[in-house]
């Protein structure tokens, strides 16, 4: 079955530590996205990538970094500069980039907490 | 910028009764609208979308949504609610993201639907 796999499901971060969240898709989608979900705030866009080796900042990129070295992979690093990282992180992909009517497909998320 | 509003944080409905989850939008051009559902500790699942055409859009799991241009609304409906419909529902609008000239999704804050047996 094609889909998006996020790992780990739960992650704990110590003060001053960087952590990396994995997102892999086998849907052959060009575009990939990272969202942060906090209770009562909906989803907020962190970073997105429309093609390999290219990515753009979203609304809340500070304290985060990404890479897109392969079409199927879009890892997110939560750096020590992100002072409030506790949240549910969702990765998504879409079949084409740019202007599109296609829906985004989502992984099952990673819940990040502070130790 | 485009925006969506979901005026109700929570909606409670009895099993077997019709349900409505409300969404209003604000866009500068033609609206492209989506509904997603999220079960606990899971990702979002696509339910339906409105791009153009008929104002009544049918989607997955018996859900439908009515597009009303004059009221700038896109309410999600189902004729007979099931307990298994209990979840968090998000409305989204396609947004022109000025940072890179591409279109992204802007989500509402979500509405928690509880279907009572």
Image (cartoon, rainbow, N blue to C red):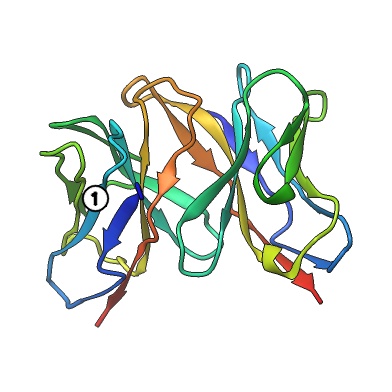
Residue A22 versus residue B11: which sits nearer the camera?
Answer: A22
Residue A33 versus residue A16: which sits nearer the camera?
Answer: A33
Point 27% across, 77% down: residue? A114
Is any part of residue B75 visible from this angle? Answer: no
Residue B114, image x and y in percent?
A: 73, 69
Which chain does the numbered disc 1 sit on?
A: A
Residue A110, image x and y in percent?
A: 33, 65
Residue A56 versus residue A73: which sits nearer the camera?
Answer: A73
Point 33% across, 26% down: residue? B99
Point 75% across, 41% down: residue? B64
Is any part of residue B72 visible from this angle? Answer: yes
Circle 1 — which element? Answer: strand
Q: Badge 1: how crowded within 10 Å, few (<14), some, or many (20+)?
A: many
Point 48% across, 29% down: residue? A102
Q: Name the residue under label 1.
A: A24
Task: Name the residue furthest front.
Answer: A1
């Amino acid at each position: 079955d094609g889909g998006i796999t996020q790992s780990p499901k739960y992650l704990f971060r110590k003060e001053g530590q960087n952590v990396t969240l994995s997102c892999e898709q086998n849907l052959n989608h060009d575009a990939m996205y990272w969202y942060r979900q906090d209770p009562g705030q909906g989803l907020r866009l962190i970073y997105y990538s429309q093609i390999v080796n290219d990515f753009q900042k979203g609304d809340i990129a500070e304290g985060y970094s990404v890479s897109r070295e392969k079409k199927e992979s879009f890892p997110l690093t939560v750096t020590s500069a992100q002072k409030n990282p506790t949240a549910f992180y969702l990765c998504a992909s879409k079949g084409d980039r740019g202007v599109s009517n296609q829906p985004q497909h989502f992984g099952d998320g990673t819940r990040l907490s502070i130790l | 910028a485009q925006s969506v509003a979901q005026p109700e944080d929570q909606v409670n409905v009895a099993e077997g009764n019709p349900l409505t989850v409300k969404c209003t939008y604000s866009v500068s051009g033609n609206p492209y609208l989506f509904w997603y559902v999220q079960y606990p500790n899971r990702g979002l699942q696509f339910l339906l979308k409105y791009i153009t055409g008929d104002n009544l859009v049918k989607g997955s799991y018996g859900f439908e949504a009515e597009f009303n241009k004059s009221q700038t609304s896109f309410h999600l409906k189902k004729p007979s609610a099931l307990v298994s419909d209990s979840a968090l529902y998000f409305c989204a609008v396609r947004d022109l993201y000025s940072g890179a000239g591409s279109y992204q999704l802007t989500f509402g804050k979500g509405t928690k639907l509880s279907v009572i047996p």
